[in-house]
Structures are given as C-alpha cells and as structure tokens.
Image (cartoon, rainbow, N blue to C red):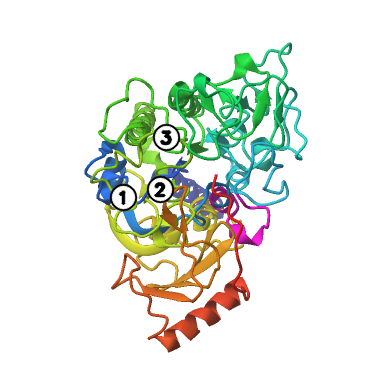
C-alpha cells in the first residue's frame, strides 16, 4: 500500500511539472534586440514630429507616432565627441578633461577598463555592432593607419565595427572595419597629420580650383573628392571614400549586420553622418527639399532609417527590437562650407522654438529629437519627462537584467518605455567645456566671459558676464533672464550646481568651433 501511495505521488509530481513547465515558457518575454540610431547635428526642429513643415521625415515620424516622443530629451553636450562618450559610458563628459571635439588622430577617449553599453550587452549574451561615425579616438595617438588600429571600438565592447575615424570633414577619409582600413593598397600607405602638410599635396586653401564645395572657415586642408578637409592626408587613394555614397555604404553594412545576427540577440549602434558637414546627398536625394544640401541629407537620413526598419520587419524582428533615435547635439547651418544652408533656410527653423544651436549652452544646443519605439511593447504617446542620453546605460541594463550602471546614468527604463512620466529632476548640460544646470523647469547658466555669438556659425553660445536664470515652463525660448528678480531660486540653483559640478569660476573659454 505504501508503495502504491509513493508511486501515485511521484506520478502526480511529474504530471504537474509537465503541465506547468511549457505554460511558463510560453509566457516568457524573448530577450529584445536594441538598436540606437544616432544622427549628427540634427536639430529639435528638423523633424516633422517636432514641428518641421519644410523637411519631410515620414520614417522618423512613424517611429514617433508609434512610440514615445520626448519633448525634454537631451544630449549630454552641444558637441559630438562628448555626447558620444556620455551615451556609451553613462558618465558626464565634463568629468573627463579629454572629452572634447577630437581630431582624427586623437587617442581613444574611452578607457578599455570602463563599463560601456556594448560591454554591458556582451555580458548578457548579446552580439554587439557599430556602423557609422565613431569620433571617440583610436589607438594611443600614434596610429599607423596601414596596420591594425587599436585600441578602438572592438576594445571597448563592440564585436563588429565598420566606422569612419572622426567626422566626414576630417582626415583620414577612409572606412575602418574591425581596426583595418578597408580597400587599402599596401603600395600606397596612408600618412595623416594635423600639424603640417605633406610636400606636394594640394589643399583647399592653395588649390581652390580643385574644389566642388568651397570652404567658409576652418576646412581648407587636404582635398579629397573635391572637398577640402580639416587635417592633412597623403596616400590611401584606393581606400578613400566617395562622400555621396557614404549614407548607402553605412546603411548596407547596418542591414547586413541585422540579417547576419537575426538568430541571436544583438545591440546595434547605427551612427548616421547626416546632417553634419560636408553635406553631400546622393544624386537620388539632390533637390528633394528647397533648403539645399542640408535639407536633402536630412531626407536622405530619414530614408535610410526607413530602410533599416524595413530590414528589421523583413527579418521578423520589429516586434522584438527596441529602437532609440536621437541626435548628438543641436543644429548648425554654416559649419565650415558654402553649401547654402544659411541662405536657403527660408521658413524652416532647425532649432524649432528653442534658442541657440550647436556649441551653445542655450536649449537648442542639447535638447534634441529623442524617440523610443518598440512595436507592441511601448504604448504610443508624448512624454514631457526630462531624460538624457547618459541615462541609456543604466536604463538598458535594467531592460536586460544587468547590474551594470553608469556613474551619472539614472535608471529610467519605465520612463523610456512610456510607463512613467517622472524623469530626471536635475541634469548638467555641457558645451565646449562650459556647463549649465537644468533643475525642474529651470535653467541656470553661470557667468562665462567668452564671446556671446560665434560669428562663423552665427549661433548664440550662452555666454554672459552675469548669471542667467530661465523658467522654461513660461519662457521656452529663454528670452527673459530672471536672475535679478528671483534671488531665492537663483541661490537654490547655484547651490545644486556646485554640489554636482563643483564651483566653477567665470572664465574666458577658448572654443573649438570646427
């Protein structure tokens, strides 16, 4: 009898397990892929979902309509390298004194021992890839471009990397795949310098007859593809890119990456080069707007984003992929070349209702388009929560069950998923070494003695000899300085700023505006 009871007990346990186990597996949420789409110099007002009527961006708008569109989404800096550093490391760029706009020969900015987004994903079983602009330095500052270049993206967590070293307007003008220059002829070695030209090499300054795009300021060195650049380069002729093909080149690599890794979880950092200078749309997109090359490359970028989404859908991955779209800083029109961006802007406002732009401590320097999309998992809507790209590391770590966190990265996963509207209370914003504070709906800009307007780019930088205090809930365009009339609020903001940032004395900044 005891034997029969024991046998019945064992059979019952087995049947209960058999019934319950499959049901549990069916309810498990598959691990999501993550794609970050990062534009270059795309302004708050450059996108249809944020108010643009002169530039049509249907694919970005589709993401905004199907996901969460943040009205208070920030890059960490008003320039590129610092913002990219913050996004990948979860730390404020001003904590690293080297986090400035980098030359093409700058050493790797991120420490190989630092926690990064790709490292976090790799530890959770993801394959990780970057396609597009890097601009975070390579090697140790003494790079031999004819050998494997390291350390670089692969050494900070990316399994696959297909990049350009810096920016489209800087040498070296070559693609680099997993540390090796693509298409390099060993009989035509590359040499790069940011100090002096190589004998006999033409420059935009001395050979304007070679140019198809004239330089306005700062871009008068080595000529490649009829465009003069920042810095000097010799050799590597077969490896040099054709600017007009760059968007297609990066898109195809990003699409291939998705297809090749469709059967495993992946993190893709797809970093567009548009609408940074030189603006060189493929002939398919020339004339798509009335705004000249800058408008046309934004349309081109939007098309690329649509094609990437189509690839995800074709692979059956769209419902299992979180997409984050943003920009590294605010807009600029004339940023070094005569390309009619400033003369043909018409009724278009790249900054939307905001003041300033790239390089600026005013809102348009760092407040940018910011969208999260996950089909079937994110409820569409608009969020006024304050979020920053620096928060992505800690928040995405929450998503995939990682304990990794960034130094200044807040855990805002529920906000990014559209389930909570309580974002950051405090945020330090940075522009070319200068910093400001957003707290609640208030902005504090400390005194800086630099020029108020950079005449080359025609942008207000936010510098003033006195404190500036703005209430964004009543004055989004930052036209009314309340520092003289709201003394208690000013003192509160200064105290908070100094606790986070440390005391910063007024000073004259030497600005790199290239």
Q: Residue at x 64, y 40 (%)?
A: 103
Which residue occupies the foreground of this view, 334 or 491?
334
Write down the residue under mark 2: 331
* Element assignment for label 2: loop
Q: Residue at x 47, y 25 (%)?
A: 246
Write down the residue under mark 3: 338
Q: Between disc 1 and disc 3, whose residue precedes?
A: 1
Q: Residue at x 73, y 26 (%)?
A: 148
Residue 100 at x, y percent in the picture: 62, 51
Q: Nearer the viewer, mark 3 or mark 2?
A: 3
Name the quadrant of the C terminus.
top right
Contact, mark 1 vs mark 2 (Cβ under 8 Å)? yes
Residue 379 magenta-highlighted: no
Residue 97 magenta-highlighted: yes
Write down the residue under mark 1: 45
Residue 337 at x, y percent in the picture: 46, 35
Asked if residue 390 is positioned above or below residue 317 in the image, the reply reads: below
Q: Is residue 65 in sight in this rendering?
A: no
Q: Residues in magenta?
A: 83-100
Q: Residues within 10 Å of mark 1 (few under 14, many from 20)?
A: many
């Amino acid at each position: 009898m005891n034997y029969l009871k024991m046998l019945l007990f064992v059979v019952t346990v087995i049947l209960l397990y058999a019934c319950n186990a499959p049901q549990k597996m069916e309810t498990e949420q598959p691990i999501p892929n993550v794609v970050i789409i990062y534009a270059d110099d795309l302004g708050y007002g450059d996108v249809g979902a944020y108010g643009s009527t002169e530039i049509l961006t249907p694919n970005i708008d589709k993401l905004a309509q199907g996901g969460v569109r943040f009205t208070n989404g920030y890059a960490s800096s008003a320039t590129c390298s610092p913002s990219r550093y913050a996004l990948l490391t979860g730390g404020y760029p001003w904590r690293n004194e080297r986090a400035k706009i980098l030359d093409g020969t700058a050493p790797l900015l991120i420490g190989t021992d630092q926690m990064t987004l790709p490292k976090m994903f790799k530890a959770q079983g993801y394959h990780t890839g970057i396609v597009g602009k890097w601009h975070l330095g390579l090697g140790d500052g003494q790079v031999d471009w004819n050998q494997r270049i390291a350390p670089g993206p692969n050494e900070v967590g990316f399994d696959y990397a297909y990049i350009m070293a810096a920016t489209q307007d800087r040498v070296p003008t070559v693609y680099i795949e997993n540390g090796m220059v693509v298409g390099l002829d060993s009989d035509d070695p590359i040499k790069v310098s940011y100090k002096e030209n190589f004998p006999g090499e033409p420059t935009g300054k001395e050979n304007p007859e070679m140019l198809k795009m004239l330089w306005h300021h700062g871009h008068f060195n080595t000529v490649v593809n009829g465009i003069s650049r920042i810095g000097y380069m010799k050799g590597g002729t077969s490896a040099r890119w054709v600017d007009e093909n760059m968007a297609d080149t990066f898109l195809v690599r990003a699409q291939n990456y998705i297809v090749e890794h469709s059967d495993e979880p992946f993190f893709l950092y797809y970093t567009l080069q548009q609408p940074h200078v030189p603006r060189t749309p493929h002939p398919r997109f020339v004339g798509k707007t009335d705004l000249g090359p800058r408008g046309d490359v934004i349309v081109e970028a939007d098309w690329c984003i649509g094609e990437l989404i189509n690839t995800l859908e074709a692979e059956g991955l769209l419902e299992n992929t979180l997409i984050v779209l943003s920009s590294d800083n605010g807009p600029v029109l004339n940023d070094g070349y005569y390309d009619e961006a400033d003369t043909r802007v018409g009724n278009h406002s790249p900054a939307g209702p905001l003041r300033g732009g790239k390089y600026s401590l005013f809102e348009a320097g760092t407040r940018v388009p910011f969208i999260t999309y996950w089909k079937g998992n994110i409820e569409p809507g608009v969020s006024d929560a304050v979020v920053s790209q620096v928060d992505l590391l800690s928040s995405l770590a929450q998503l995939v069950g990682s304990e990794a966190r960034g130094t200044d990265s807040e855990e805002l996963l529920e906000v990014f998923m559209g389930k909570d509207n309580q974002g950051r209370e405090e945020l330090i914003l940075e522009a070319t070494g200068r910093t400001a504070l957003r707290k609640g709906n208030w902005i504090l800009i400390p005194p800086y003695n630099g020029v108020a307007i950079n005449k080359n780019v025609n942008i207000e930088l936010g510098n003033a000899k006195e404190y500036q205090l703005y209430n964004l809930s009543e004055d989004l365009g930052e036209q009314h300085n309340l520092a003289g009339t709201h003394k208690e609020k000013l003192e509160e903001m200064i105290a908070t700023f100094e606790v986070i940032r440390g005391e910063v004395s007024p000073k004259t900044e030497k600005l790199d505006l290239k």
